[in-house]
Image (cartoon, coloured by chain):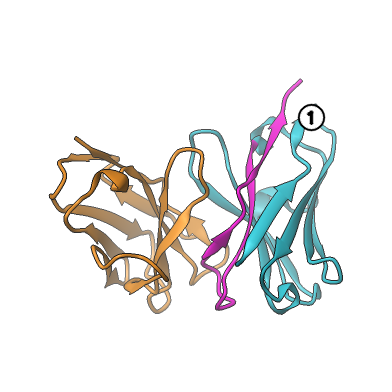
Chain colours: A cyan, B orange
Amino acid sequence: QVQLVESGGGVVQPGRSLRLSCAASGFTFSSYGMHWLRQAPGKGLEWVAVISYDGSGTDYTDSVKGRFTISRDNSKSTLFLQVNSLREEDTAIYYCAFCRRNNYYFDCWGQGVLVTVSS
Amino acid sequence: EIVLTQSPGTLSLSPGERATLSCRASQSLSSTFLAWYQQKPGQAPRLLIYGASSRATGIPDRFSGSGSGTDFTLTIRRLEPEDSAVYFCQQYGSSPPTFGQGTKVEIK
């Protein structure tokens, strides 16, 4: 059974950094592109970033380009999101997710991890 | 990027009734690359529909999707109390993938 477990969130001051992790199990992690999405408190969903199955390709939403870096370790079935230069508007629940048909909709989600950016 | 506008903002219906949720795209979607999700408080979203009309695994046939181009609809027949949630549409035909702002369905 597919399981995605995020960790690494917390309260951080503006301008600081965090590294989010997503531990995957129950499927062949190295076969799938993986995504990060986020949801600000009480708000809608926003796609953040994607990484190809082998890590050779990445893409980001414009608001995080140059600040966030998505990466993966297929030997450990783990997805990462390095978030730098955090802003208050980055406050959100961050979800890792993927699609078992390798498309850009999402049928498997983690439970999410909260990142709060506040001085 | 493609903007998705959902209506209504809130739908308040009784058990057994039918809910009709709308999602309108700011430009025509490539093929039918539209998905619908259900999200309950404190939970991650759950995929209901992909490809505008294909039900995801385990989704009851009370849920159906339709539409093409710029106008899409999620219909929930015979509402049950457990259907109380926020429903989001998402397009994935154009980068970046984008979501609508959500429709809250309340069961009276």
The answer to whether residue A95 is magenta is yes
Q: Residue at x 38, y 59 (%)?
A: B26
Q: Give the magenta range.
A: A92-119
Which percent across, then down, holds residue A70?
Answer: 78, 59
The vertical placement of A103 against A15, above or below, is below
Crowd tier of the residue under label 1, counting other residues whose Cα lies within 10 Å: few below 14, some 14–19, many 20 or above: some
Q: Viewer-proximal residue, A49 or A96?
A: A96
Which percent across, then down, holds residue A9?
Answer: 75, 39
Which percent across, then down, holds residue A111?
Answer: 60, 48
Q: Secondary structure at mark 1?
A: strand
The answer to whether residue A93 is magenta is yes
Question: Of all residues shown, which one is farthest toward the front?
Answer: A1
Q: Chain of mark 1?
A: A
**Number of labelled discs?**
1
Quarter holding the C terminus of chain B is top left
The vertical placement of B86 against A26, above or below, is above
Q: Residue A90 appears in which quarter of the rendering?
A: top right
Q: Viewer-proximal residue, A97 or B88?
A: A97
Q: Residue at x 56, y 63 (%)?
A: A108
